Amino acid sequence: MIKRHVERLITGALREFPVVLLIGARQVGKTTLARAISSGPWKAEYYTLDDRSILDAALSDPDGFMRGNPPPMVIDEVQRAPDLMRAVKLAVDRNRKPGMYLLTGSANPLRLRSVSESLAGRVAIFRLDTFSWAEIEERKAPTSVIDALLECDSAAELLSRLQRKEVSARREDIERLVLSGCYPDPERMKTRAARDSWFNSYRQTYLERDVKDITSIADLPLFGRLLRVMALRTGNLLNLMDISRELGIPYTTLRRYVGLLETTFQVEFLMPYYANIGKRLVKTPKVYFNDTGMACHLAGLTGWTALENAGLSGRMLETWVWGEIRKTLPLLDAPAEPMFWREQHGGEVDFVLERGTRLAGVEVKSSGSVTSTDLKGSESFLRAMKGRAGITVVLYQGERAFAPRELIAVVPLSLFFGAEGRVPRSRS
């Protein structure tokens, strides 16, 4: 089994919280991880609501199900029986102690209207994503690289810390990761045909079963077209009015459908940076597809040249970078908040990380070289955030790290995300 970096956080939480909730998209490995954890020092019985008899029992008498099956226990795919969350709450309140329940969900049950009871104060929540590059390569998560970006006061200092690391990855390795995605099954598959078959099956199952389990969708083909439109718009500002016109779907219906895509971890939104926190809540977010392999499949583009010809290579690479950042942030000892920055007259930085009063910028370029034009967004950001921003880094597909400006470092993607040491293989 490939070691999942979040495992240590989950096992630690089971020693402190009565309930741990592990959420994430279908097929990212939640069941595998939950079974591994429950067969280790934290011994627990495993129940999955994908089993019809278990699901029927949980639906018909959730309180009886909880009383008849004492903790510790794993309940897999808990969103299929929403009232079970209320029964879990009552069981915890009757005899609260750490490590009672490990719940998993392919839809975030705390976001669903059908869940009336909150486990606030009783639950630690973790998200399991598709594999990170570090997990695939059995390396440590690049937490020290993110910390260095937020701590360094000059590009030279950042490069000094990065140059002590060794990498052997090539541009082709990253392009392959973008195209194949990081779901566990297709990542291991050797042929494009096998991956296409898997993605087709995943899409069909998602539309015909997972979506129906959560809510009633009157027009599944239309919802399927929305899924493809969101894949094509990954890395763009979310323009619901534009999508509404393109698909001929009412705006209110579209908002509900897009919310469902977020609830089931197919897409997510990144908010813009504003010094006034209140403004962040009302401005237009950027939308990112959860997995670049699925996005490329939905777009019908299976080669890097095809992505370039369609003008999508940059945004697919940016989406992959966002995934790597997103998977690393929960592992940091000191948290950092991700956003993007865009000014009215064109200045833009793809990602901004905020820790306390400290800001750092990350810009992504799909080319193998960086020109002065490519630095303009970072320069505008540093001017606008003077006194708050330390440095920015421009990630690109070249091989050399250098500092074109005092506060701007240009760093190969392979060095930024691929430079940590190896970790021991997890138990099988």
Image (cartoon, rainbow, N blue to C red):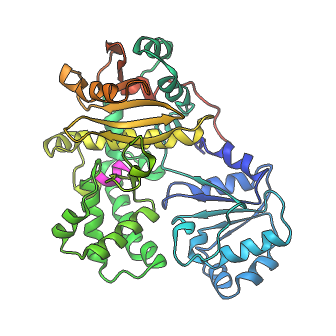
Residue at 33 percent across and 63 percent down: it is: 200
Q: Is residue 416 above or below residue 239?
A: above
Residue at 29 percent across and 51 percent down: it is: 234
Along the line of sight, which residue is nearer the eye, 280 or 203? Answer: 280
x and y percentages locating residue 377 in the rendered image:
26, 30
Tell me the quadrant of the picture where the N terminus can be found.
Answer: top right
Q: Determine whether, in the image, residue 402 is placed left or right of residue 424.
A: left
Q: Is residue 148 above or below residue 256?
A: above
Q: Residue furthest left?
A: 309
Q: Is residue 264 above or below residue 2?
A: below
x and y percentages locating residue 211 in the rendered image:
42, 74
The mark total stands at 0
Residue at 79 percent across and 68 percent down: it is: 92
Asked if the stretch drawn in magenta spans residue 293, the answer is: yes
**Highlighted range, magenta:** 291-295
Asked if the stretch drawn in magenta spans residue 140, the answer is: no
Along the line of sight, which residue is nearer the eye, 422 or 356? Answer: 356
The kind of secondary structure the magenta stretch mainly shows is: helix
x and y percentages locating residue 41 in the rendered image:
80, 49
Whether residue 52 is visible to the viewer of this picture, yes or no, is: yes
